Amino acid sequence: MTRRDRPTRLRRCGAALWAAAALGGCGGGDGADADDERRSEASALISQAGKTTLAKATARQYLDFHTEPARKVAFTMDGVVDIGADDSRGTIRYEAFEGVDPGTEVEIITFDDIDYFRQGGEESWLKTETTEEDAIANSSDVPDGLRNLGAVTNDARARGRESIRGVPTTRYTATVDAERIPDTLPPEQRDTARRKLQVLKEPELPVQVWIDDAGVIRRLSYEFDLDNLRAPSAGEERMVATIDLFDFGVDARVQAPPPEQTVEE
């Protein structure tokens, strides 16, 4: 993988990842008043859990991502995220990706919406000056994902109790209405949100959320139809992304690499 090819390929994958990790949905219902009330309460709980988790400021994150049915794209990423600053750093490990050998590891830093990549063994970082959408595609997506839960619709359902990394949680399914997202944000963030959403064809998207007893989100999981993206799909039908958040409060200070250690795309 050449220096010039690497960010382009990573951004292709990131576009699908951003659209799924930042947004969500799964609907349905029988119309009964009691059922509607339970769903409304569950939706409010999910929205509040997004705010509660944002307030944690930092966390470790672990992402497991793959496309289906052929797993043409499959990788994991582990690292830390500064939720408040929307910065992150971590290591991507590839199982499958066009032009990338299985087992390849690439370090990634996202700082001030600029992405820096360094393949294992290299001394310099590749700085990617990208469009706004590309920068978002390469981010960890956790802060946007949490903020976007403010647009969850009233169809959420509790699906049972599960343990995530030893922490008891309740799993929920819900729907986020992407068209409502800008209205849930501060005025200065709304135009940016609208531009990000241009990657989507349809506004209603799926998410599963695991929330612990303190109201903190421990896992987000998405199964997403790639036909709903205005982005390359790698010839696959859908993608599955699962993000774990843990070790809240960890030191997650993120800095850009020194200028003398970076090269331009």
Image (cartoon, rainbow, N blue to C red):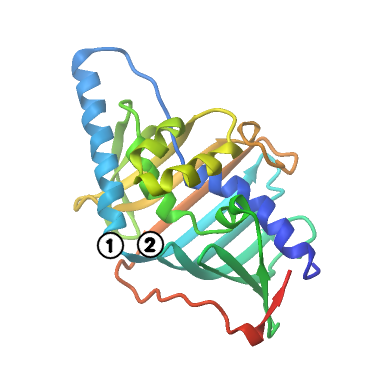
The image quadrant that residue 171 belongs to is top left
Q: Residue at x 54, y 48 (%)?
A: 18
Crowd tier of the residue under label 2, counting other residues whose Cα lies within 10 Å: few below 14, some 14–19, many 20 or above:
many
Residue 2 in the image: x percent, y percent?
A: 81, 69
As measured in the structure, the alpha-carbon distance from the residue carrying label 1 to the one carrying label 2 is: 8 Å
Whether residue 223 is visible to the viewer of this picture, yes or no, is yes
Q: Which mark is residue 56?
A: 1
Q: Residue at x 66, y 37 (%)?
A: 230
Would you say the residues marked 1 and 2 are in contact, meaning their CB atoms lie under 8 Å apart? Answer: yes
Residue type for callout 2: Ile
> Which residue is situated farthest in the front direction here?
188
Name the residue that disc number 2 marks: 83
Residue type for callout 1: Lys
Residue 197 in the image: x percent, y percent?
A: 53, 39
Q: Secondary structure at mark 1?
A: loop
The image quadrant that residue 41 belongs to is top left
Q: Which mark is residue 89?
A: none
